[in-house]
């Protein structure tokens, strides 16, 4: 059995580095949905939130993380 891919009908939340992914979440999902409720809340941004966070001039926005 190949455990490197998520099972059909299960959350596709991936963790790991390029080429070494694991799919630790085994929650069931509805047809056409990729993530369980908890993981969807982490990755989904509603359209109105996306519009509010978009720079006014549509330019790329970069933040300095560390010096």
Image (spheres, rainbow, N blue to C red):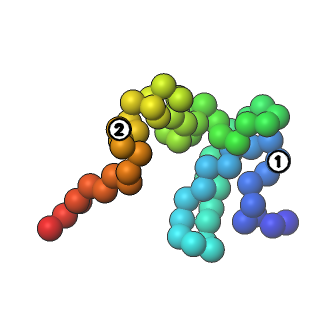
Residue at 38 percent across and 54 percent down: it is 60
Circle 2 packing at 10 Å, graded few (<14), some (14-19), many (20+), is: few
- Label 1 sits on residue: 8
Find the residue positioned furthest to the left. 67
Residue 18: x and y in percent read 57, 72
The number of numbered discs placed on residues in the rendered structure image is 2
In the displayed structure image, the side of residue 17 where residue 55 appears, left or right = left
Q: Position of residue 61 (x, y in %)?
A: 33, 52
For the residue pair 30 and 28, the one nearer the viewer reads as 30
**Of residues 23 and 49, which is closer to you in this image?**
49
Res. 9 image quadrant: top right
Which residue is the site of mark 2?
A: 56
Disc nearer the start of the sequence (1/2)? 1
Q: CA distance from mark 1 to mark 2?
A: 41 Å
Quadrant in the rendering for residue 38: top right
Q: Would residue 2 be seen by someone viewing this image from the given angle?
A: yes
């Amino acid at each position: 059995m190949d455990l490197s891919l998520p099972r059909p009908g299960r959350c596709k939340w991936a963790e790991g580095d390029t080429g070494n992914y694991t799919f630790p979440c085994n929650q069931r999902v509805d047809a056409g949905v990729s993530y369980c409720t908890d993981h969807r809340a982490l990755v989904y941004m509603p359209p109105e939130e996306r519009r509010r966070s978009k720079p006014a001039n549509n330019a790329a926005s970069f933040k300095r993380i560390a010096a």
